[in-house]
């Protein structure tokens, strides 16, 4: 006989940062809430695990900036232990000829660095950042509110209340007015929202180290070329967010990225939220009245009239529900979602910091505080993509490396370091191989590439973890290994996320909501998905 886990106002599937945020806001509104987490650790992709004695590793996500300040304030995250350590400088890009580009938040220092390659680019770079910041200031408020449903969908697709139609019209009108404030910069804004990164960067700049450093930002987590439409949009993410202390400053979380989940969990517990670990959901329970709760893999059921899912749309609708529980047109649209992914993650425990031949010195230096890029030119990035397009891991991969131990002394033994490597392109679907067979040899290739610029790294490795796209799917429940819970292409953003007609966190099943990155505004450690879902749930119930 199946056991009962209890009766709640709302059950949240998944204790990633969005799921915990939804739970906390609902509890603040007086609801009785349970959060069910499949794994033994909280945080989803924003987690910290002690992989080796003394080494506390942010196994998946690794830096933060986009987490909404109002969430930090509303949920008292700083009081509950969240501490963000700003990064400056922000990036270090060595070149094959022994030079380097070091960028940070000081305008004069950036000008000096860029002028080593191009005086023209040094003059243009502040103008470029100012343009992105002006456009981001218009776009960011739209990202942080529930998306409207403005498209003329068939009446049998969804019946939308008049109050919601007025609310959506108000949001669209507000965006229309704000967008109009850009004036003559509207064409540039449209290109940034829908265009390709490469032509924009080539128009602005002439030096390859600067172009390549910025281009790498455009394809984070995307299976796309920098010449593909839609890649420019992600450039805006890197001038957004204030979690690092001011706009566009990214930071490390003290204690690892799991510090966000730890602070959220403490807030949730103070608000009376029940958090259950090692509780894998296998079924969303429904009746003709809508959601009725969930059933775990061991048969335990949790009753609730509201279920909020922070996992992706594929798992929510195609694994936890049966086809007959959903309208056929909706299920077809969900089945057509793009989860194309080409990312891998390598975590290293090092006996000493990387020593780059382009930046001679011993021990820690400023370059270790920022993201260290191995992507010297835009053609290098394009060639890496071309390999993946034909079902192969990149022969010469793009590597983004961060070393949180450069500023955080709490996560490794004294004098030892953690190097976090985000790798592209590593396509989920391989043409002539299996990731379980080749992931270690691919990691060897990545380490060898690092050694071309920092020869001491191979000999400094004490421990290594390799997460292929297949591992990201298995461990974190990410369909296709996609870290954004679905590609961030134009047709899967804003009013089309997850699908047109259902962009406001609601679903065809009454009482079932999406509260994770599968909903607007998508991936990244923002928290907006979780906060906005809670707003809509409270509005309905």
Image: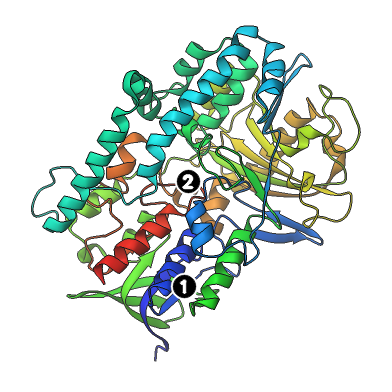
- Residue 462 in the image: state x and y as whole percent: 84, 49
| Residue at numbered disc 1 | 35
Q: Quadrant of residue 395?
A: top right
Element carrying mark 1: strand
Ranked by sequence position, the earlier of labels 1 and 2 is 1
Q: How far across and how far down the image is residue 135, in percent?
A: 41, 30
User: Mark 2 packing: few (<14 Cα in 10 Å), some, or many (20+)?
Assistant: many
Q: What secondary structure is marked by label 2?
A: loop
Q: Is residue 169 above or below residue 444?
A: below
Distance from disc 1 to disc 2, alpha carbons, whole Å, reads 23 Å
Place residue 180 in its image quadrant. Answer: top left
Q: Which quadrant holds the N terminus?
A: bottom left
Residue 489 placement, left or right of 50: left
| Residue 476 image position (x, y, % from top left) | 53, 57
140 over 467 or under it: above or below = above
- Crowding near pointer 1: few (<14 within 10 Å), some, many (20+)? many
- Asked if disc 1 and disc 2 are in contact, CB closer than 8 Å, the reply is no
Counting from the top left corner in percent of width and height, residue 474 is at: 53, 57
Identify which residue is drawn at 71% across, 22% down: 109
Residue visible at 76% across and 13% down in the picture? 97
Considering the image in quadrants, where does the C terminus appear?
Answer: bottom left
Q: Which mark is residue 425?
A: none
Q: Mark 2 points at which residue?
A: 482
Residue 488 makes an appearance in the image? no
Q: Does 27 sit left or right of 78 as displayed? A: left
Can you tell which of label 1 and label 2 is closer to the viewer? 1
Relative placement, left or right, of 374 versus 281 is right
Q: How many labels does the image show?
A: 2
Q: Which residue is drawn at 26% across and 34% down?
A: 177
Q: Nearer the viewer, residue 25 or 213?
A: 25
């Amino acid at each position: 006989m199946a056991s009962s886990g209890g009766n709640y106002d709302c059950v949240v599937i998944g204790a990633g940062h969005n799921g915990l945020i939804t739970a906390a806001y609902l509890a603040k509104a007086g609801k009785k809430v349970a959060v069910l987490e499949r794994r033994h650790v909280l945080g989803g992709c924003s987690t910290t695990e002690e992989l080796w004695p003394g080494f506390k590793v942010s196994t998946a996500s690794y830096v933060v900036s986009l987490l909404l300040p109002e969430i930090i304030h509303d949920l008292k995250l700083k009081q509950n232990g969240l501490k963000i350590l700003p990064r400056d400088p922000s990036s270090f890009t060595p070149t094959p000829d022994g030079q380097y580009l070091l960028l940070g938040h000081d305008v004069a220092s950036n000008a000096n660095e860029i002028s080593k390659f191009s005086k023209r680019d040094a003059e243009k770079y502040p103008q470029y950042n100012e343009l992105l910041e002006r456009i981001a200031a218009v776009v960011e408020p739209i990202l942080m509110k529930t998306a409207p449903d403005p498209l003329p969908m068939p009446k049998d697709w969804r019946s939308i209340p008049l109050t919601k139609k007025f609310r959506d019209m108000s949001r669209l009108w507000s965006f229309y007015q704000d967008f109009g404030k850009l004036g003559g910069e509207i064409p540039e804004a449209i290109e940034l929202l829908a265009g390709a990164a490469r032509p924009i960067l080539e128009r602005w700049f002439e030096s390859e180290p600067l172009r390549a450093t910025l281009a790498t930002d455009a394809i984070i987590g995307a299976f796309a070329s920098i010449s593909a439409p839609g890649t420019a949009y992600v450039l805006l993410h890197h001038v957004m967010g204030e979690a690092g202390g001011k706009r566009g400053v990214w930071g490390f979380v003290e204690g690892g990225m799991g510090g966000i989940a730890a602070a959220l969990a403490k807030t949730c517990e103070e608000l009376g939220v029940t958090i259950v670990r090692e509780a894998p959901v296998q079924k969303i329970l429904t009746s003709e009245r809508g959601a009725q709760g969930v059933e775990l893999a061991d048969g335990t059921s949790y009753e609730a009239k509201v279920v909020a899912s922070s996992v992706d749309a594929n798992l929510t609708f195609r694994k936890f529900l049966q086809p007959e529980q959903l309208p056929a047109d909706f299920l077809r649209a969900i089945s057509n979602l793009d989860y194309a992914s080409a990312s891998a993650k390598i975590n290293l425990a090092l006996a000493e910091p990387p020593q780059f031949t382009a930046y001679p010195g011993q021990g820690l230096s400023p370059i270790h505080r920022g993201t260290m890029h191995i992507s010297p030119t835009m053609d290098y990035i394009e060639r890496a993509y071309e390999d993946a397009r034909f079902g192969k891991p990149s022969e010469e991969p793009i590597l983004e490396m961060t070393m949180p131990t450069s500023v955080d002394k709490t996560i490794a033994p004294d004098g030892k370091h953690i190097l976090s490597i985000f790798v592209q392109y590593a396509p989920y679907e391989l043409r002539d191989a299996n990731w379980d067979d080749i992931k270690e040899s691919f990691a060897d290739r990545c380490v060898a590439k690092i050694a071309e610029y920092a020869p001491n790294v191979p000999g400094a490795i004490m421990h290594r973890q390799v997460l292929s796209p297949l591992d990201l799917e298995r461990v974190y429940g990410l369909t296709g290994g996609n870290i954004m819970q679905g590609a961030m292409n134009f047709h899967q953003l804003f009013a089309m996320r997850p699908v047109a007609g259902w962009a406001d966190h609601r679903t065809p099943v009454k009482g079932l909501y999406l509260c994770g990155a599968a909903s607007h505004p998508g991936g990244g450690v923002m928290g907006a998905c979780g906060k906005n879902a809670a707003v809509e749930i409270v509005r309905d119930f």
